[in-house]
Image: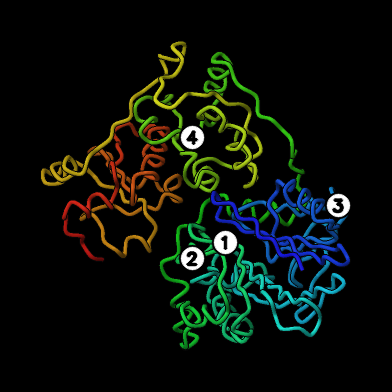
Amino acid sequence: MILEQYYIECLSHASYLIGDERTGRAVVVDPRRDVTEYLADAQRLGLTIEAVINTHFHADFVSGHLELLEATGAWIGFGEAAETDYPIRRLRHGEHLSLGGVDLEVLSTPGHTWESISLVVREHAGAAATAVLTGDSLFIGDVGRPDLANLGGGTNADLARAMYHTVHATLSPLPDSTTVLPAHGAGSSCGKNLSTELSSTIGEQRRTNPALQPMSEDAFVALITDGQPAVPAYFSADAALNKTNRPLLDQHRRVPRMSTAQLRVELGSGTRVLDARTPDDFARGYLEGSINVGFDGRFAETGGMVADIGDRVVLITYPGQEQTAAMRLARIGADRTVGYVNVAAGSPFPSELGDLVRVAARTTVPELERLIAHDLVTVVDIRNPGERENGVIPGAIAIPLAQLRTRAAELPDDRPLVVHCAGGWRSSVAASLLRARGITAVSDLIGGYDEWAARACRPARI
């Protein structure tokens, strides 16, 4: 049996290739749009991909089922409750899919969404379970959040109650040695406490996962509905794209280099400029109206928070990062990257753009302490609700980054703003977003809340 995991840090996303070495038959589970790696590995391993199975309608990325359909002719599988604009095979609870020897058993595991399924993998029919691919139902250390979709109607509480039965009655009873292989890891907005580990076992999760501990259904509902991360705006767009016959991704597209004259035209027409350099380089000099989304962080997901899926985008990147950055955006359905400009680390923009270059204000922790003491500033906390449980800066207004675009009007305009996150990466995103919206009296806190707390500032508990 062949069971390969493909993990991309930028989206904390895992997909899988399962194959039978004897028959050469294979399936891909929860693929991303850039499918060349699956195709290359299948060829190298002597496998024919005959099926593409999605454990549910993903909201955080555009799945590659249509790209694999075009490349291989494979059929597309979803859970029974799925409704799509393209032909699918609806997979029933308890159904077995044979690859010759390797056996896949379908489990209906609603809770994250109504159509969610998991796949139990066995070396052959009747054998003990080797692994279970749990999609967004069971994570390592957590379970999927119940508020991203209500495809069959009902409320978030209905999905949370369905998840209770999924994890306690369907997944937890699997043998202790069964390897748990989820669709996401730490950092994903599809849950709140995901582990950095990419696999575990049912036995280990039964012992350590808070959601699998003995508890009442009501206690479980309270546990998984409280403190979830704010939902990025693009999630609803991606969930919809995954149900439709959308355009295919050009697997070999190269985004063109843009001249300074072309860049000026794009800036004048309202094209979104995403600057993928570090917060330090961005602060030393940025193009007016650009937003800092560092390549070294959660570039794709954060890009989907500050720009709409259909926006025209120009990238500012370090040399050699431009094509990967464009592909990361394409993975969430943002296909309209029209060009890029390179700026080397520590270097200024070309002199021809000098009239458009600005310097970003930044604030240190000692400076912020002084400003707060004299009531000269408004502090904006853009962390997620669960992060704030560890402490807050007194008086800070809480607006998670994912909601900042729609809630910026709530911010007072009677004094300057200082934006902070945990460590300083997201606050640069937020401050630049606010500047791009015309709020100029804004800076980001260097080092974020972590630096504030480390300097012996007493955290104010919520």
Q: List the residue tagged with mark 4.
A: 276
Q: Measure the alpha-carbon separation of dots 4 and 1.
A: 24 Å
What's under tag 1, amino acid-wise?
His
Mark 1 or 3 closer to N-term?
Answer: 3
- In the shown orientation, is residue 59 left or right of residue 20? left
Is residue 364 shown above or below 179? above
Q: Earlier in the sequence, mark 2 or mark 1?
A: 1
Q: How many neighbours does mark 1 have within 10 angstroms: few (below 14), some (14-19), or many (20 or more)?
A: many
Q: Amino acid at mark 2?
A: Leu
Q: Quadrant of residue 308?
A: top right
- Which residue occupies 69% across, 76% down? 130
Q: Position of residue 25 (x, y in %)?
A: 85, 63
Residues marked 1 and 3 touching at CB (< 8 Å): no
Contact between marks 2 and 1 (CB within 8 A): the answer is yes
Q: CA distance from mark 2 to mark 4?
A: 26 Å
User: CA gap, disc 2 to disc 1?
Assistant: 8 Å
- Pointer 3: what residue? 72
User: Is the Cβ of the residue at disc 3 closer than 8 Å to that at disc 2?
Assistant: no
For label 1, the residue is 184
Q: Secondary structure at mark 2?
A: loop
User: Is label 2 in contact with label 4 (beta carbons under 8 Å)?
Assistant: no
